[in-house]
Amino acid sequence: MSDSTRIYSQHISKQFNDELEKLRADFAQMGELVTRQTGDAVTSLLTQDATLAQSVLDLDRQTNEKERLIDQDCTQIIALRQPAAIDLRLIISISRAVVDLERIGDEASRVAKQTLDLVQCDSGTKGLKEIRHTGELVVEMLNLALKAFHTGDTELAYKVVKFDLDVDQEYQSAMRSLITFMMEDSRAITNVLKAIWVLRSLERIGDHASNLAEQLIYQVSGTDVRHMENREIKEIVRD
């Protein structure tokens, strides 16, 4: 790995360096699993593919196990190595970020369960256009957040934080459309409600992706930007 992507100190102990690198590699692998879950969950719903939806649920077991192992490694490194400065921030940020990744996996599983329910009932889904667009946005957000984590790019991380506003606006617009569907045709209420639950899960995925980006900014800058306004985060990233 090049120095430009190494987000931790170099130590006399090669084992310590290897432990930190393994931690980053395991986090990246968990990120890939969750990104796959999210993309497949949206695709399964749009295509009414029950097999793909079931594979999303199966992946969730792997995601949960990854979270457990990474959390265990973080605790062990802190206990044995007593890291400081950027090394400690790396471990803390990953420990926090895996929680968001696991919750993204949970939301993807909820979308997959809606797919299985719809397939079993042999009923179509209202709001597919809105679901597709929102799904594309949150998958892009997740990809960018994980790329920022891999490269240590705080500018990219800030872009993800700003991106969350677009997802929120898209969510609100989609909700208005779906409410209109229900008002115009009461027979569509059941399916529209399912679409609303899916959109809610996608919006939460966007929130968690934004949290990932905030953890990367903390890791690099040393400033905890959670709950800060975007303009404040921008100043920290630009400094």
Image: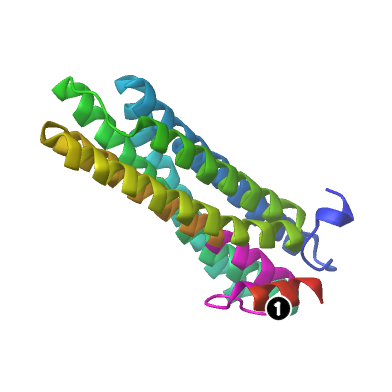
Residue receiving disc 1 = 222
Where residue 112 sits: x, y (%)?
Answer: 32, 35
Percent x, y of residue 86: 74, 74
* Closest to the observer, 109 or 115: 115
Of helix, strand and loop, which mostly describes the magenta segment?
helix
Q: In this view, does 172 lie to the left or right of 70?
A: left
| Residue 19 in sight | no
Q: What stretch is highlighted in magenta?
A: 211-230
Q: Measuring 17% from the left and 33% from the top, which residue is drawn there?
A: 188
Quarter holding residue 87:
bottom right
Q: Which amino acid does label 1 sit on?
A: Gly
SS at badge 1: loop
Residue 205 falls left or right of residue 3: left
In which quadrant will I find the C terminus? bottom right
Out of 78 and 32, give the one closest to the viewer: 32
Q: Which of 4 and 238 is in front in this view?
A: 238
The residue furthest left is 187
Which colour scheme appears in the figure?
rainbow
Residue that protrudes farthest toward the right in the picture: 3
Q: In which quarter of the image is residue 236?
A: bottom right
Q: Can residue 218 be seen in the rendering of this structure?
A: yes
Residue plotted at (73% across, 79% down): 85
Q: Where is residue 200 in the image (x, y as percent from the top left)?
A: 34, 50
